[in-house]
Amino acid sequence: MKRIGIDVGGTNTDAVLLDGDRILRSIKTATTSDVMSGISTAMAHILGDDQAFEAGGVRAIMIGTTHFTNAVIERRGLSKVAVIRIGLPAAHSILPMQAWPDDLRREVEGPVFLVRGGHEFDGREIVPFDREHMQAIASEIRDSGVKAAAITAVFSPLTSACEEEAAAILTQMVPHISITLSSQLGRIGLIERENATIINSALHGLARETVSAFEAAISKSGIAAPLYLTQNDGTVMQASHAARFPVLCFASGPTNSMRGARMLSGLDEAIVLDVGGTTTDAGMLVSGFPREANSKVDIGGVSTFFRMPDVIAIALGGGTIVDAENGLVGPKSVGYLISEKARVKNGDTLTLTDFAVRAGRMEFGDAALVADLPNTLADHVDAWSRQRLADLVDRMKTSAADAPVIVVGGGASLVPDELPGVSRVIKVEHAGVANAVGAAMAQVSGECDQVFYDIGREEALERARKIAERRAIDAGADISSLELLDIEDIPMSYIPGNPLRVRLRVIADLAL
Amino acid sequence: MREFEFDELEALAIGAGVLGTGGGNHPDLELMCAQAEYRRGRRVTLIDPQELADDARVAVVCIMGAPLVTKERLPEPVAICKAVRLMEAHCGKPFDAIMSIEIGGENAFFAMLAGMELGLPVVDADTMGRAFPEAQMASFAIRGLSVAPFAIADIRNNSVLIPEAENATRIERIGRKAVVELGSIAGTCAAPRSGREVKDHAILNSVGRALKIGNAVLAARHSGHDPVDAVLDAEEGALLFTGKVQDVSRRTTDGFVRGKAVLAGRGGFEGQMLEIDFQNEFSVARLDGRLLACVPDLITVLDEESAEAIGTEVLRYGQRVVVVALPADPIMTSAEGLTVVGPRAFGFDFDYTPFTEQPA
């Protein structure tokens, strides 16, 4: 079965054509400002001359993109959002967007409303939902001209009735407003869930445009296969779903690289170094998936509940500048200008790439142009890189034992073949497009985060698993490949009925 | 008496997290609340217990309920204010100051937030010096002072007054039932204490202790030093273990989350296993089966990098942590104290030994 994986990064758009596990073609091109033409170029290349034949066999296209994260970080393309929180007289001690950075808040904040209603953890009402107030709010939103809304109610992941009723009233009064309900994003924790809901709504316009640009580029290439976008956890969702829930794509970049590294190396347990033009990201594969970060995750300065891969970045990449006079390396980089700036390319800047070419680790430009660099400087730069990479690997490790390291990314050949504390350095073929491979190989997932009462642990886990599996199947899972990915069950203190909160995730291959 | 400074709020949150010993709910939402109040121009003052007149009337307050509920309903200091007003009405006299039942976790902040709202100074003291799961585990109860009358209120118009009760345990049980009916979270105000009683029977200067820990961590983070070392230096604490969370098992019995965490050693502890038992808070730590520390000493699990305290509810497989022990207050390690908060009170079949006296 053929599929295409595309990674649209800030600098490069990478694409691969896979047949099963076999890579038929791959390409790295520059990301274009309209996104679409970069993808078109990449598609044209990997489909090659025999376009009709190749295109006919492709069953799915997976795109990983940092577009939405970057929009939040760079505060561009965001819409104003009307924010409705249902929970009074509770849930008013911290106001919506209170802890947001001012500049982001200015871009996103529309009218904000607190309404009486919401539910307790056990499904009882806090107080009855104030419908009249909601109607008044809806007419105010209509008059404000704001085109997006975010609705959050207390304990909506357990009882979503208030959010749904509010949305119905709002849709009736403001027909074309785009709405995100916090219960659609799940997870308990009102502030973080509300933040994610607001950001999601602010991205609706951009997400619709981006996804239709993706679709246009695909259809231009003559392929009629379904389009999927990759999510934080290394799984995919249908493009139409991504257009409604762009926040789910947020950390897919590092995840795709690591999943690609796994596929290219066949290793389930290893440290992955993704070496780019400016930075090297280190992450860890545990049972074939990225280990997740301990702490809460901020996106553009806003706290959300998304689980993110545990990644550490250091300033070491192909474009890292070497100051020959003082023997200083980095942290500045020429980044994506490497092809113009590096000495091996007749440029004026000495970079780590030049030393890798000189040492014979990398084929790029003209090695003769760096033959004159003194050995002492080369040894110094080499020692610096080794030390930095060895430290980075050590920070990722969970034990002192030597660990295998998989190296991917455009600058992969920068990494020496041996490193202290590393059992072996694995350099894989197609390392430069590992992220596109990871996107192409992405599976689907289903999650359940729910509280169960008065039933045994085993039964609660079983029920949660059924819910998660149903959601995975709805997302396109092949039933025969369903697998439990992670599970967490937390009994809740001081509440009768032995409540058990179960968070469970299953994954599966796409049924194509 | 002095004004509490804005920068001290974050330090208080970090310190209260550490003193929460895994329970008490990390006060991150309450910190946001307090910072917003400060930005609006509200202030709260901290009063040293020695500055209290002997006949001053002190309100002893806390939020009672399920930590998870706060994450959805958000902190509710208003409920505490209602309980305080109810107690004033019952006793017919106003309060002069307010203090928290426990300094560990979010309750460190509720006294501050309610103090701001009511215009009362917050006493630099509490009754546990940490977090404990039940009301009778407080120093006033240990010293035989009555917890009744006891007021409970929610944010709607529901309140409960328990004018008398045979003992603190009974109040704890009646209170829990009432709190569940109120949505599993409510504000409480216990029997008024005189300034003299606070000076004689409270855990003194515990707000200061939390601030000292928090300030040390913040200073270390800013200067690039190890924040875990900073906690140990600030507190005459001991490093018990460095490792990775290997397994966490939890079960609910009688409303408490009881369980065990197993940690695999890293660095100097490679090849060793630490087991920590908990009942809401961490109670006993054993290294390869050998007792290292137990209640009422404080056992705290910190994130290896940031020294942020990790609660029993958020302990997860794969977390890289450091486990430290901090000394308990002498009231807690006295003979009366140990019958209520010693290892046997938590169902263990051995007596208390301070972590400082364990063979290295």
Image (spheres, coloured by chain):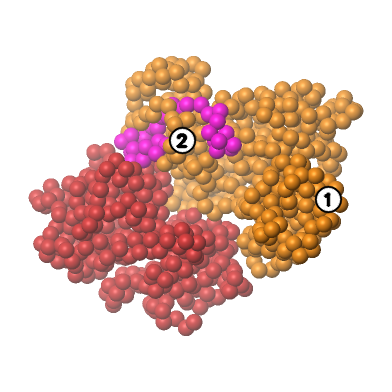
Q: Which chain is red?
A: B
> In the rendered image, which quarter is residue B197 located in?
bottom left
**Residue at screen point 18% across, 55% down:** B97
Q: Is residue A386 left or right of residue B113?
A: right
x then y, percent, for residue B73: 37, 41
As drawn, the label of residue A103 is 2
SS class, disc 2: helix
Tell me the colour chain A is drawn in: orange
x then y, percent, for residue A460: 54, 48
Q: Chain letter of disc 2?
A: A
Magenta segment boundaries in residue numbering? A69-98
Above or below for B169 versus B34: below
Q: How far apart, in angstroms, are the residues tagged by discs 1 and 2?
A: 47 Å
x then y, percent, for residue A14: 75, 38
x then y, percent, for residue B290: 51, 78
Label 1 Cα neighbours within 10 Å, binned few <14 / some 14-19 / many ≥20? some
Viewer-side residue, B335 vs A18? A18
